[in-house]
Image (cartoon, helix red, strand yellow):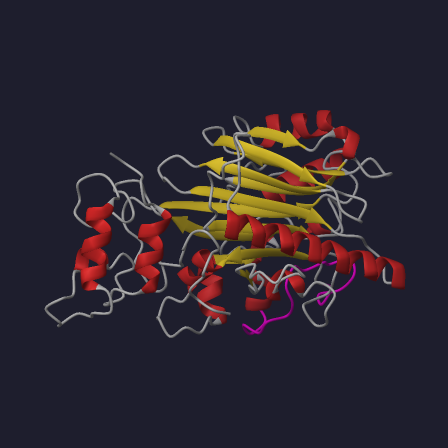
């Protein structure tokens, strides 16, 4: 997939490939989890979900030290009061936003988000399509960073009959079009018909009800929908702790202990800018070990808890799904991306300085390190994209 993204109306580029994390960068953890039939309809399911998804250890089998979600994306929730109670007990101080009850599917299901209490929710939307559950998009102002974070969650149509597969394919196309159009044209969050958010840090989460990107059913999410725009998404194909415990081989994506280890239904797909963070050696190849360092699919007994600990019964008691977890960083707000001259704004002066250095590398007299925003040793289209994406900010 192309690493540099040409956005219609605005150049926004991936700028973090292989770069070191600075001290003021903000690290976040996103978890997606299908609750199957509600997160807390029985005490056993409630406890198992709490053990798997949070740091609080009510059953004494922990310690649950590895999972502290900044954003928890939930599918197939059935009761806002259950979610409120679960949140209050297991994620105190966090905020719940469940989808509109009028958009629930015939079984009473809809998606929900539980997120850190200091996040500012800038916008929330639900999008109708041919499937039974609306896709949701939530946009956050994350403390400590000037970049917005856009998170989509979906629960595609299940089952393998021809009608269900066709619906799932249409859902993938609809979501791919939405993500790509948001990235290309921006999002109007205040209703004035003028886009004010151009996503660079964005994530698609959810239960896609497809074993893998092995045919064309959900391929649109990676290769683009019928609007012919690039989604900029990448499959966060991370190995499970269980997989690492049996020789380090990839044994599937999200693990499902009820239906077998190869059943992969749940996904986290990340934008190019996030995905590029995992190419830590800069070779433009995303190795399994690099992905494991940044995120993981959670399947663990207490004795497997190398990165997270909890109760593997969560995947057979709390749900027929296992949570997918990914960690990534967003740039700190210590400075304004694109501010070449350091005067606190991004304007014509900065553009002139960058263009004077454009195409030049370390060792050449025209090279300007202050215009090399991704610190890759040259000033190129990626750096220009960063400046244009922030043009007019500050001051």
Q: Tell me if residue 194 is in the magenta stretch.
A: no
Where the C terminus falls, by quadrant? Answer: top left
Q: Position of residue 286 (x, y in %)?
A: 46, 70
Is residue 217 shown left or right of residue 117? right
Q: Please say if 176 is above or below 193.
A: below
> In this picture, which residue range is highlighted in magenta?
245-263
Q: Please say if 199 is above or below 290.
A: above
Is residue 366 shown left or right of residue 24? left
Q: Please say if 2 is above or below 277.
A: below
Q: Position of residue 173 (x, y in %)?
A: 70, 58
Decide which of 56, 238 is in the foreground and name it. Answer: 238
Instruction: Identify which residue is drawn at 74% across, 65% down.
Output: 217
Is residue 254 shown left or right of residue 42? left
Residue 58 seen in the figure: no
Secondary structure mostly seen in magenta is: loop
Q: Please say if 26 is above or below 385.
A: above
């Amino acid at each position: 997939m192309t690493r540099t993204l040409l956005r219609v109306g605005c150049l926004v580029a991936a700028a973090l490939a292989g770069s070191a994390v600075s001290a003021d960068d903000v690290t976040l953890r996103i978890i997606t989890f299908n609750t199957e039939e509600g997160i807390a309809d029985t005490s056993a399911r409630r406890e198992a979900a709490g053990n798997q998804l949070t740091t609080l250890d009510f059953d004494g089998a922990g310690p649950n030290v590895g999972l502290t979600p900044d954003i928890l994306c939930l599918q197939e929730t059935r009761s806002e009061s259950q979610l409120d109670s679960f949140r209050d007990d297991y994620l105190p101080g966090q905020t719940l936003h469940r989808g509109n009850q009028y958009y629930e599917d015939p079984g009473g299901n809809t998606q929900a988000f539980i997120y850190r209490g200091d996040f500012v929710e800038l916008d929330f939307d639900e999008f109708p399509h041919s499937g039974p559950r609306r896709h949701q998009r939530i946009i956050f102002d994350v403390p400590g960073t000037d970049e917005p974070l856009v998170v989509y969650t979906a629960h595609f149509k299940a089952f393998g009959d021809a009608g269900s597969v066709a619906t799932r394919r249409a859902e993938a196309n609809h979501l791919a079009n939405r993500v790509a159009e948001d990235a290309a044209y921006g999002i109007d969050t205040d209703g004035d018909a003028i886009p004010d958010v151009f996503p660079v840090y964005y994530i698609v989460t959810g239960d896609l009800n497809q074993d893998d990107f092995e045919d064309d059913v959900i391929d649109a999410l990676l290769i683009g929908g019928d609007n012919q725009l690039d989604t900029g998404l990448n499959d966060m194909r991370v190995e499970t702790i269980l997989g690492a415990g049996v020789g380090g081989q990839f044994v599937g994506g999200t693990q499902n202990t009820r239906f077998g280890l190869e059943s992969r239904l749940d996904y986290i797909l990340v934008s190019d800018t996030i995905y590029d963070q995992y190419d830590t050696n800069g070779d433009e190849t995303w190795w399994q070990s690099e992905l494991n360092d940044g995120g993981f699919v959670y399947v663990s007994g207490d004795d497997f808890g190398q990165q997270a600990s909890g109760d593997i019964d969560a995947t057979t008691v709390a749900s027929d799904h296992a949570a997918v977890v990914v960690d990534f960083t967003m740039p700190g707000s210590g400075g304004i991306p694109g501010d070449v001259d350091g005067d606190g704004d991004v304007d014509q002066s900065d553009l002139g300085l960058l263009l004077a250095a454009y195409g030049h590398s370390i060792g050449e007299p025209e090279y300007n390190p202050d215009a090399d925003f991704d610190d890759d040793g040259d000033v190129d289209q990626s750096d220009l994209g960063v400046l244009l994406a922030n043009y007019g900010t500050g001051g």
